[in-house]
Image (tube, coloured by chain):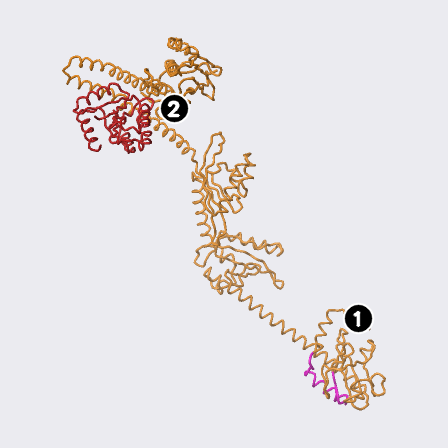
Chain colours: A orange, B red
Amino acid sequence: MAPALTFLNKDPEKSQISSWLPSGQPLEKDFDQLLLLASQICDTSIAAITQVSKGHTFFKAIHGWDCQEIGWAPEKDESTNEAILLIKDTLLDKHFSCHPLVKGEPNIRFYAEIPLVTDTGILLGHLCVMDKKPGSLTDLQVSTLRTLAKSILCFLSLKSQLKEFKKNDDLAVRNEELMETIFHDAIDGVIVSDENGIILKWNPKAEEMFGWRAIEVIGKPFYDTVIPGRHQAAIHSLLIKYQKDNEEHITGNAVEIHGRRKDHTEFNIELSISPATIRQGRYFIFFVSDITDRKLTAEKLDKQKVFYENILNKLPTDVAVFDGGHRYLFVNPAAISKEEYREFIIGKDDYEYVKYRNREIAVADVRRARFLEVKNSGKEVRWEDSLPDPDGNIITHLRRMYPVYDDNGDLTLVIGFGIDITDRKLMEEKQTAYVKQVSVQNTQLIDFCSIVSHNLRAPLVNISMLVDFIESSEDPDEQKLLISKLRPVIDNLHDTFNELVESIQIRRNLEIKSEDVCLNDCIKRTVDGLQTEITKLDACLEMDFNEGSVIRYPPQYLNSIIHNLVSNSLKYHQPGRKPVIVMKTRKVNDSVILSVSDNGLGIDLVKHKENFFKIGKVFHRHPNAKGFGLFMTKTQVEAMGGKIWVESVPGNGTVFYIEFTNQKRKAS
Amino acid sequence: VKKIFLIDDDPVFVYLTRKIIGRTQYSCEISEFPDGELAIEYLTDACGKIELLPDIIFLDLSMPVMDGWEFLKQYSEIRPRLKKDICLFIVSSSISPQEVERSKTFRAVSDFLVKPLGKAKIVDIINSCEETG
């Protein structure tokens, strides 16, 4: 039997059966009557149910004595498990004579035990009878004791089963309650049908949704009751498919269809169907959600989305939205017109985009720097940037970027706007040019007022005073003298008037023709005109026109300019110094700059800068200084879009510079 | 005897002014300077010599070499050293309000007179200088 026992000991069943008589538990009162019966049958004063474990004997139940545990166990071979152990006189048994209950109270002299072994061979303990006097057991007593042991086992088994049943029963009740609660309180409609779709259960939510009471629909086909006619066939065939399919293959996917109420109105539902097999029966569980609100909300959201997308997409302003890491979440068509690029950029940053578009990385650097500025400062940033468009035109944008925070103060978005201000920029440039032009014209007007005030009014005052004197004088000689003084005043007035008229003509003559004028021819003409002075002063003229010997200009203006400058140099020469006049041309971009330098008196520019080119201004005590030359020269230069300026050191000489513009074509 | 300086480059105007002054009852000693520079040089040299300094200066604005404005700038600098109170009048053919305003920035300027100057005006001026003198 030993191998069988060893095998059985390994069986998990054993531990379960062991729990029939759990060790370490208090004495079982349930066995009191059985043990009384055992002691009466065997005519012994004590009966007990014992368990042996680790050299100790535990009394699980006892009659006729009171003891729970002793530090002693009978020495037995396992093979004796099924046999009765009978000690007629313990004092004569070498082993039992050491038993604590033999040695001490109650001084046991007779001992017998029957093992309690289950049908499956598990030893649970022993049924013992003991007496204070030696004795024995008849065969009848032994067989009755065996029957009693079997009864004990049967009792233990029943007791254990009862406990198990009770446990299961509680669980079943609880589960059922739980299921019922879920079924009743579910926020979804829950409908259970049999495999043919005949409704078995219908929860209160379904009642509320469809308007059918449970008792009205139980026993009717599901699809007939809640699905509009046009969808019934589809649902029916779906159920048929589910009937055939293995349960595991069906995923609980939901469909959005129309449901039909008792009053035949329809509404949007989400229906999910779960086939289930319960105790070999096939069932369907239908979960129904009313999604009317969800549908409406979704439609509203869709409308809103279209509305905002329309605005964003049609906005002439560039709009870009970034996440906290400078990745694009959105760009509108104004920012990127090509849909392909627009789709590319979502989820990417500027570095990826410049690479994709083959643009300079500096563009991304600038944008990243601005983004970080916004992120770190938490404030709006504005800047202008200029980029070439696909046609190579420079487009200028005014850009604004600002951060958007959520309720917790965390950066959620950065929104960027760009407005094309190219036109505005051009307008600004034009405006600046206009302002400059107006300011030049204003200066000319002030000059003109000053000319009228000083140069025209002064001789008129003189004439008027002279006339007064002539009229009041009675002396003919005095009258003659006064009249003689009128002549130069009138001549001066005449000259001034002519100069003014000429200068106005120059300014207004926009149609004067430019020609290619050879500078050397022009100078020859001047030298011829001034030959007397040149010879008298032994003046030396040097020319270097390597960088431009032909000027495209109105010939009369150019002749006048050169004549004026050379005659000035001669007029204001340093007495006792041989005049040297040097003329040079220099090319700068599209312009030719002519310089005329002399070694003459020079002019104190600190004193005379303001008046330098004004009419009637003279800077030297020279009998022929009238102050017309430079005024006219400046007028002739500026009328053609050129510039004139001067450098001078008193005592050393003067250099005049004239810039002739738009000379690119012919200057060589 | 009143000493009067005419600082003006216009010989006709100087000639006529001399004639007008000659027709007044005052005996005047008139000096002419055709530009500001010659006048300022004279005054700088004569600033300590009361007998060489004028009582009245008539100053033109538009002159070669050194105009009236530059003269006023330098005159203001030497004025504290002048041993005589001098009445200085700007006499200009200009009727520009800006120039009148500008003349007011110089404390040395007594008034801004617009050409022509009549006899009555000159008598007024000599009288007023008599009183302050």
What amino acid does circle 2 point to? Asp
Of callouts 2 and 1, which one flags the residue occurring earlier in the amino acid sequence?
1
Q: For the residue labelled by badge 2, is the local secondary structure a helix, a strand or a loop?
A: loop
What amino acid does circle 1 point to? Thr
Residue tagged 1: A6
- For residue A632, above or below residue A38: above
User: Residue A170's spot in the image, x, y percent?
Assistant: 60, 72
Q: Which residues are magenta?
A: A25-48
Res A442 seen here: no
Using the numbered discs, state the Cα–Cα distance from disc 2 to disc 1 in whole angstroms: 133 Å
User: Residue A565's spot in the image, x, y percent?
Assistant: 39, 16
* Chain that bears disc 1: A
- For label 2, the crowd category at 10 Å Cα-Cα, with few meaning under 14, some 14 to 19 and many 20 or more, is some
Image quarter in which the N terminus of chain A is found: bottom right
Residue closest to the eye, A45 or A157: A45
Is A32 covered by the magenta stretch?
yes
Residue closest to the eye, A429 or B12: B12
User: Residue B23's spot in the image, x, y percent?
Assistant: 17, 22
- Residue A292 is labelled as none
* Chain that bears disc 2: A
Res A552 seen here: yes
Q: For the residue labelled by badge 1, is the local secondary structure a helix, a strand or a loop?
A: helix
Residue at figure coordinates x 84%, y 88% from the top left: A91
- For label 1, the crowd category at 10 Å Cα-Cα, with few meaning under 14, some 14 to 19 and many 20 or more, is few
Residue tagged 2: A604
Q: Nearer the observer, disc 2 or disc 1?
A: 2
Residue A307 as seen in the image, left or right of residue A191 = left
